[in-house]
Amino acid sequence: MKLILKWLLSATALLLVAYLYSGVVVTSFTGALIAALVLGALNTVVRPILILLTLPVTLVTVGLFLFVINALMFWAAASLVSGLNVTGFGAALIGSLIYSVLQLAIEFVLERLLFNK
């Protein structure tokens, strides 16, 4: 139940990113659902590998390179899903920042308020 709710809220967060920032376009809620699924898969599989491979750069930049990795994941999801369009790398960076803040809020709500054990 929690996984489905998080997926639906992540898709809604993508729609909110598109509403707040014109560099990101989501064509429909179905496109947002697919994009949220692809983004979650990329963040689960590819992101840890990229973090490990770019660890020296991340350490030198005091962790700021992680923003670049997040933007690359967002951009990759947009290139894989036809329902999510990003105008460029800068738009992917800003879109991923907004999406990350919304994901933090979703995690907070799910963990603290709904599924507190």
Image (spheres, rainbow, N blue to C red):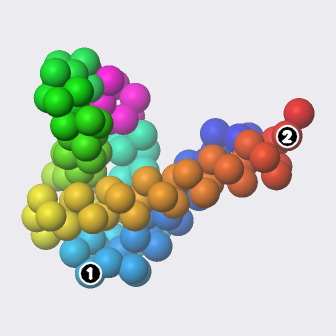
**SS at circle 2:** loop
Residue 78, labelled with which disc? none
Q: Nearer the viewer, residue 88 or 77?
A: 88
Residue 37 vs residue 107: left or right? left
According to the picture, the residue beneath numbered tag 1 turns out to be 22
Q: Mark 1: few, some, or many residues within 10 Å (few <14, many ≥20)?
A: few
Q: Residue at x 35, y 59 (%)?
A: 97
Q: Residue at x 21, y 22 (%)?
A: 55
Which residue is at the front of the view, 89 or 14? 89
Residues shaded magenta: 41-49
Q: Quadrant of the C terminus?
A: top right
- In the rendered view, does 7 fall on the left or right side of 110? left
| Residue 93 in sight from this viewpoint | yes
Is 44 in the magenta? Answer: yes
Residue placed under numbered mark 2 in the picture: 116
Q: Residue at x 17, y 30 (%)?
A: 60
- SS class of the residue under badge 1? loop
